[in-house]
Amino acid sequence: MPRKISYKITTEYDKRKVLDLLKEKGYSHRLITKLKQAPDGLLLNGKHIRTVDLMRESDTLEVNLPDDKKESISIPVEMPLDIIYEDDDLLIVNKPAMLAVHESHNHLGDTLSNAVAFYLINKGKPTTFRSVGRLDKGTSGIIVCALNKYTASKLSGKIYKEYLAVASSVFEGEGTIDAPIYRPDPIITVRTVDKRGEKAVTHWKALKSDGENTLLRIHLETGRTHQIRVHFSHIGSALVGDTMYGKADSRICHQALHCCYCRFTHPVTNKTMEFEAEMPDDMKSILE
């Protein structure tokens, strides 16, 4: 789906090149190249303009982002979607725990990407599925989907998230786990703490305990695959229900981990965006 973004030229960009504004607004070199190649990719006051041309205060620069007709779009499959927020650049959903995010050899037609494809196609907005960050299958919560390449590029690595987790030990107060995470076998997804790994830092705060397990509020300083699950397993407190790093639990059929909060700056409006998603019932029941 094409997306038009308009910029009213301010004093800051008076007598400066179009390229200066595009770079400072976060457009990638690849996207700028595509905009230059498109007849109406860049328009100044409604007329074609080159990136080397100068702008004047009060001009209007129009950026027409290319659509995804030539990009791969997931097979549309009708499934329920818990949509938290939507605009021309973003779709934010609350993902159920047992729904995988991306299609793979194990998941074809039963993923979040399929559900989003169906939803957008039926709204007349077919686009490539671009999740900014990801959640493991078995982890529920907030997923931010970018509806164009510019939004995806601007938000990459820029979303602050917090998680709720139930760990299988008693915790009090707050603390930090600073331990490198390593992937011993490139074919197998399992990670471990090892000095050969990449730096990984997890901050936690205890919220509630039943004398055996503790509900924790967590935020990450780094974003390694399986980071929360690996770190708490490493200290002998694997997440409840995590069969990869701990053990099965009759009260829940997946790891007790939920992305409950996110915050970021909107890539187009520059407004601060904040979203929350309530912890699912199966996690709540563990400590009840």
Image: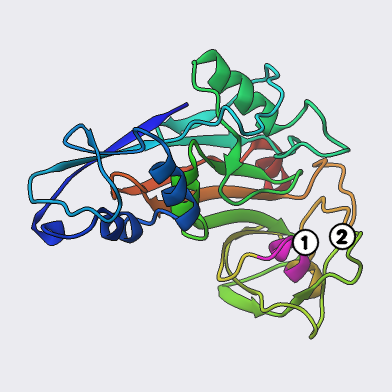
Identity of the residue furthest to the bottom in this view? 195
Q: Please, what secondary structure does the residue beneath circle 2 have?
A: loop
Is residue 199 magenta-colored? no
Q: Amino acid at mark 1?
A: Ser
Query: Closer to the observer: label 1 or label 2?
Result: 2
Instruction: Decide whether the magenta segment is chiefly helix, strand or loop.
Output: helix
**Side (left or right) of 57 relative to 156:** left
Residue 2: horizontal and vertical position, in percent? 43, 28
Residue 210 seen in this snapshot = no
**Where on the picture, by quarter, is residue 199?**
bottom right
Residue 93: horizontal and vertical position, in percent? 54, 35
Residue 131 lies, with reference to residue 17, above or below; the image says above
User: Closer to the camera, 12 or 43?
Assistant: 43
Residue 10: horizontal and vertical position, in percent? 11, 53
Residue 83 lies, with reference to residue 34, above or below; the image says above
Ranked by sequence position, the earlier of labels 1 and 2 is 1
Total number of numbered discs in the rendering: 2
Residue 232 seen in this snapshot = yes
Q: What residue is pinned by disc 2? A: 246
Location of the C terminus by quadrant is: top right
User: Closer to the camera, 52 or 80?
Assistant: 52
Q: Please, what secondary structure does the residue beneath circle 1 have?
A: loop
Residue 38: horizontal and vertical position, in percent? 41, 36
Q: Which residues are magenta?
A: 224-231
User: Closer to the camera, 91 or 14?
Assistant: 14
Q: What residue is pinned by disc 1? A: 168
Residue under the point 55% across and 23% down: 126
Measured Cα–Cα span from mark 1 to mark 2: 9 Å
Residue under the point 45% across and 50% down: 33
